[in-house]
Each structure stands twice: as structure tokens, then as C-alpha cells.
């Protein structure tokens, strides 16, 4: 082949490559202008992102975020609609059924009337599966849900902190103007204040790519150019036009999570009309404070207050307030704005355990020692904690992030990172980390032990003169505390208690408490320790619980039962806050 032949061949090949490249470029998707004029203009679907980001798409699909809201179908519904598919509660007989067309709630009311509701969507996929029905074009959360952990049907009266109720529909709630905002991408209720009806749209059901990366249309069109993609791959090229939570100011990055993990109200409150009509104005990467204000104990929305959602020191008692908790932590307040601790310091959105979206490493002390390097060595942490290095007492989480926050049938670590102060329990009613592990010890024991182990730090702490605090703190809280404290203590007894000592107290709690959610934790403890005995049903009212309570009491001596009842009665007599209502 002559030189001219070679040059001709190269030219033909180059031309062919260019033709193919231009053809491919010309066939690229048109994204900019998608849903023009809507709140989700230029947002993409996760399937659009998958074209280039298959690995991230796959890791996201594993998460509970991706399945937060789903269309009801054979691939998504987890509840038992075929075998254990009935629930009778407050005289309403519910049967959950399915056919080729879908899934249904069939109700027979106490007066004999019947209802049938088709399930349109599911919400949640880890602990509880909730269901949306449609009525008059509006989506409603149905008051029956499926408890995925205990594999049983339940009333949502057993999930929130409300006392026993005679209202079957107490937690029937319109989804369009409430839940929709955090369980989907770019909610737009399109609410008509005249008709009081919504025509809800979302960019995508569930918590998908757009929730964290914002609009992707321009990025996707730029990425259609292979040369630009290669430049990006090697760290060059022009701006990617996409939000990367790992690549922006840490405070702005935390706002992306705080948008949903930090309950909020519109700022100013009159913005609510814009939100309910046009939709949520916040996009990932924005300054969240431009649109919303985090809710705190002293926040008010009209006459509504939020005080009961916080412990007396202002730290959150419920999940979805992690943003407020972390922002109030010294780890955050002492850091440099824009370059300090945030959610992604410990959590990961595309790896690790989907239960908590965290790696195994970050479940250990490494989460803290990545900054507090002076405690990396076992001998250093033992010297700091005064506990054996490999014991629970040397866990940073156990002491500085105790499980005192409730959310969806479980207690979680608080995200308001702090130093344990047991004396605050007597002074203000704030739970302390020591009593969460040392469940057989009194609060005054915890205060005195702290003074012995860290004399300088606790030099001003004093034991309480109130004899109430000489009892084991978990038992005191189980009967003398408010509903959330009682549930928390039942959970602590299950995690750290001795069944011989704790079981009679949990049985007394199950027998007498008027909050179903407290009985839920007490029943869980009893069932875990004695799986062969009839499982107590926490939704039953007092009279209906009597037979199973009597069956359980026969496991203990009459004297032990009597002592437990007397101790519980004495503690209930000093209970102050008896009518706590928190949740939603």
C-alpha cells in the first residue's frame, strides 16, 4: 500500500468516526426544557441517569430511599394479603385482599356497613408499609399498615404517641398536602384553596436522584459529548452543571439531607400558599434557609406548638429532626463553616448497609476518631471512658449519641452529640446515656459513679435528694415518665436488661399502660425473652388483654407480681406528664 493509500484510508476512517459521532450526538436526548414552567423543570428520571451512571443507579435501587413511595403492585407490596390477612380493631373488621386488578382493604363497620378501598401506592419498605388510597381524586394514607418487623397487620394508632383511642380513622391523613413533600422528588400539590382539592404531581416517586442532585437536564445534554465526558473523567473540562453533595460546601450539603431530615416550616409562613400551589421551591444545593425554618421546641404554627417533640434541653425526641440535632452539637458549632461535620461524614448514599445507609466501619468508633484522633488507640479510649476498651462503655455512640429518639417503631441514636450528664435527668427530665446501659442502676448511682470516674468534670454534680431517683432509672422511667420515656425505658430493658428482673415490670407495663406504642415495646421485650408464650397484642384494650396477661403472670411468683404492682403504682402516682401526643 502506497503512502497516499494509507492517508486515504486514515481520512475515510476519521470521516466515518466523525459521521458516527455526530449521528450519536444528534440522537442524544433532549432534556433541557423538560416540564417547562413547572417546579420540577429540567429534572430527570432516575432511569435517565442510569444511562451513564449504572453503578450509582444500582446502589441507589438497593436503598429504602428508592422504595419510599411506590405504585402498588405485585413487585412492590410486602403485606400479607392472602393468609394472615385480617385485623379487627375498634369493632371494625378489616380483610386485606388482592385480585388481578390490585390490592384492597375490605371493611365491615360496627353498624354492618361495608367499604372497599383500592390501594394505589405504598409508603415505606423497612419497618412499616403504609398504604395510600384515593378518594375524590385525593390521596389518603389509610389507618391500617403492615408491620414488616413483626409480620402482622396493625392500626397506626399503635405507631404514634397517642393514648388508646376509639377513633378508627385517627391517623387517616391526606397525603397530597403533607407526606408528599419528603417522600418524593419535587412535590407539587397544585392545591386549589377554593375547592380544597389537590392535583398532585411529583418529579419522581420515592427519594430519587433529583432529591440530592437537583436538575440534571443540562448536565445530561453536556454529557452527550464524549470528549467532554472524558475530560470530566480526568478532572478537566467545563462545569458539570449538576449538584454533587460530596463536592460542595459541607453546610450546603447538609441542607440537602436537612430538607427532609429536619422538620421545618415555611419561611416566611405565608410561603405556604406558594408551596401548596406551585410546589416545593427548594432544589438540592440551594440555601435551605431561603425557604424554610427548622422547627424547634419554641416554634409555633398558629396555635400549634412543637414542645413535646423535644426533650427539655431542646434536643429532638423524634426522628426527622436530625438536622436540628447535629447543628446544635459542639462538633458542628465549633467547626469551620462550610468545612465541618455533616451527614456525609458518617453516612453514605451509595454504599454500606442500607439500614441506616452507613458502612460497617462508620458504625464503630472510627466515625468519631476520624476527627478525634487522640482516642484511636484502645488504651487511650479506655483511659477516656473508664471502661474496658472493647466494652459497650467505650462505644462513642453509646455515650455521646444514646438511643433516645423515637421513629417508626424503633429508638435511634440522637444526632445531638453531647457529653453524658446524668444529673440533667433529675434537674430537667433529660435522659442520660449511663442509664440507657446500666438499666439495673439508679440515677443517683450514675451521678455518684460519674463523680468518681471524672471528678473534675462532674465536681458540681449532685445526687438528687428525691428518693424516686434511688430506684433503677429504667423502672422509674417505665412508670413515672411520660409516654415517650416509658417506651424508651421498655426498649432499654429489652436491649440491656436481665429477663428475670425486667420481665415482670414489662408485663406490668403491658398490662396497665394506656399508650399502645408503650405496650408495643413492652410486648416486644416479653416475646423476645419468652418466644414460646403467647405473643401479647399491644393493640388490645385493657379488658381484652386480661387473658394473656393472666397467662403471663403465671410465669412469676405471686409475691413477685404483687411487689411489681406496688412498685409500679407508687411510681405512677408521681407521674406528671400523662397526656403526651407527638408524631406526624
Image: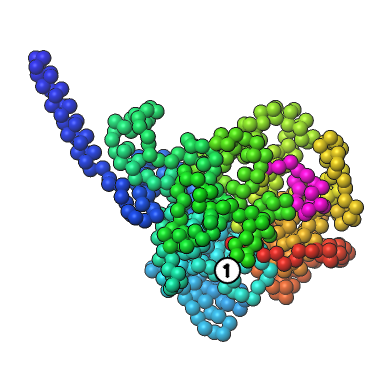
Residue at point 13% right, 26% down? 12
**Residue 406 visible (yes or no):** no
Left/right placement of residue 458 relative to residue 583 reads right
Left/right placement of residue 242 relative to residue 568 reads left
Residue at point 45% right, 60% down? 274
Residue in front for this viewpoint, 358 or 574: 574
Q: Quadrant of residue 512?
A: bottom right
The magenta segment is 417-433
Q: Residue 518 location in percent, x, y?
A: 70, 62
Q: Is residue 452 above or below residue 316?
A: above
Residue at point 16% right, 31% down? 16
Residue in front for this viewpoint, 520 or 488: 488
Residue on which the image places disc 1 = 171
Q: Residue 227 location in percent, x, y?
A: 29, 30
**Residue 363 visible (yes or no):** yes
Q: Secondary structure at mark 1?
A: loop
Amino acid at each position: 500500500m502506497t503512502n497516499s493509500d494509507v492517508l486515504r484510508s486514515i481520512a475515510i476512517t476519521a470521516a466515518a468516526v466523525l459521521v458516527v459521532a455526530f449521528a450519536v450526538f444528534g440522537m442524544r436526548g433532549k432534556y433541557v426544557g423538560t416540564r417547562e414552567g413547572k417546579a420540577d423543570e429540567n429534572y430527570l428520571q432516575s432511569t435517565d441517569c442510569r444511562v451513564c451512571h449504572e453503578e450509582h443507579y444500582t446502589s441507589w435501587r438497593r436503598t429504602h430511599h428508592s422504595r419510599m413511595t411506590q405504585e402498588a403492585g405485585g413487585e412492590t407490596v410486602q403485606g400479607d394479603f392472602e393468609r394472615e390477612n385480617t385485623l379487627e380493631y375498634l369493632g371494625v373488621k378489616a380483610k386485606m385482599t388482592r385480585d388481578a386488578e390490585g390490592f384492597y382493604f375490605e371493611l365491615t363497620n360496627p353498624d354492618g356497613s361495608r367499604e372497599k378501598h383500592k390501594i394505589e401506592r405504598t409508603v415505606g419498605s423497612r419497618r412499616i408499609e403504609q398504604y395510600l388510597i384515593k378518594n375524590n381524586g385525593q390521596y389518603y394514607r389509610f389507618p391500617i399498615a403492615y408491620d414488616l418487623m413483626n409480620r402482622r397487620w396493625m392500626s397506626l394508632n399503635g405507631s404514634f404517641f397517642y393514648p388508646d383511642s376509639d377513633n378508627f380513622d385517627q391517623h387517616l391523613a391526606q397525603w397530597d398536602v403533607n407526606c408528599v413533600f419528603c417522600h418524593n422528588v419535587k412535590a407539587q400539590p397544585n392545591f386549589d384553596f377554593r375547592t380544597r382539592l389537590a392535583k398532585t404531581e411529583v418529579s419522581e416517586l420515592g427519594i430519587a436522584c433529583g432529591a440530592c442532585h437537583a436538575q440534571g437536564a443540562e448536565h445530561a445534554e453536556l454529557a452527550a459529548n464524549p470528549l467532554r465526558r472524558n475530560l470530566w473523567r480526568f478532572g478537566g473540562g467545563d462545569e458539570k452543571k449538576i449538584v454533587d453533595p460530596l463536592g460542595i460546601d459541607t453546610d450546603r450539603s447538609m441542607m440537602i439531607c436537612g430538607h427532609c431530615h429536619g422538620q421545618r416550616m415555611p419561611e416566611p409562613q405565608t410561603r405556604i400558599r406558594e408551596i401548596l400551589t406551585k410546589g416545593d421551591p427548594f432544589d438540592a444545593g440551594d440555601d435551605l434557609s431561603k425557604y424554610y425554618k427548622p422547627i424547634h421546641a419554641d416554634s409555633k404554627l398558629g396555635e400549634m406548638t412543637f414542645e413535646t417533640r423535644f426533650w427539655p434541653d431542646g434536643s429532638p425526641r423524634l426522628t426527622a429532626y436530625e438536622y436540628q440535632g447535629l447543628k446544635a452539637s459542639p462538633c458542628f458549632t465549633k467547626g469551620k463553616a462550610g468545612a465541618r461535620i455533616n451527614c456525609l461524614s458518617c453516612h453514605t448514599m451509595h454504599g454500606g448497609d442500607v439500614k441506616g445507609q452507613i458502612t460497617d466501619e462508620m458504625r464503630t468508633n472510627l466515625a468519631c476518631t476520624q476527627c478525634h484522633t487522640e482516642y484511636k488507640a484502645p488504651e487511650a479510649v479506655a483511659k477516656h471512658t473508664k471502661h474496658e476498651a472493647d466494652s459497650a462503655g467505650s462505644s462513642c455512640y453509646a455515650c455521646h449519641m444514646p438511643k433516645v429518639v423515637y421513629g417508626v417503631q424503633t429508638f435511634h441514636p440522637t444526632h445531638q452529640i453531647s457529653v453524658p450528664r446524668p444529673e440533667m435527668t433529675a434537674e430537667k427530665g433529660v435522659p442520660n446515656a449511663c442509664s440507657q446501659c446500666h438499666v439495673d442502676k439508679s440515677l443517683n448511682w450514675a451521678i455518684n459513679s460519674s463523680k468518681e470516674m471524672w471528678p473534675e468534670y462532674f465536681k458540681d454534680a449532685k445526687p438528687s435528694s428525691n428518693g424516686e431517683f434511688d430506684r433503677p432509672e429504667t423502672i422509674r422511667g417505665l412508670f413515672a415518665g411520660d409516654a415517650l420515656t416509658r417506651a424508651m425505658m421498655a426498649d432499654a430493658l429489652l436491649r440491656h436488661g436481665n429477663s428475670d428482673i425486667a420481665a415482670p415490670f414489662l408485663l406490668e407495663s403491658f398490662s396497665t399502660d394506656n399508650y399502645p406504642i408503650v405496650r408495643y415495646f413492652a410486648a416486644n421485650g416479653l416475646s423476645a425473652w419468652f418466644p414460646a408464650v403467647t405473643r401479647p397484642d399491644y393493640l388490645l384494650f385493657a379488658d381484652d388483654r386480661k387473658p394473656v396477661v393472666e397467662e403471663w403472670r403465671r410465669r412469676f411468683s405471686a409475691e413477685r407480681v404483687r411487689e411489681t404492682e406496688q412498685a409500679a403504682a407508687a411510681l405512677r402516682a408521681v407521674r406528671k406528664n400523662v397526656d403526651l401526643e407527638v408524631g406526624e
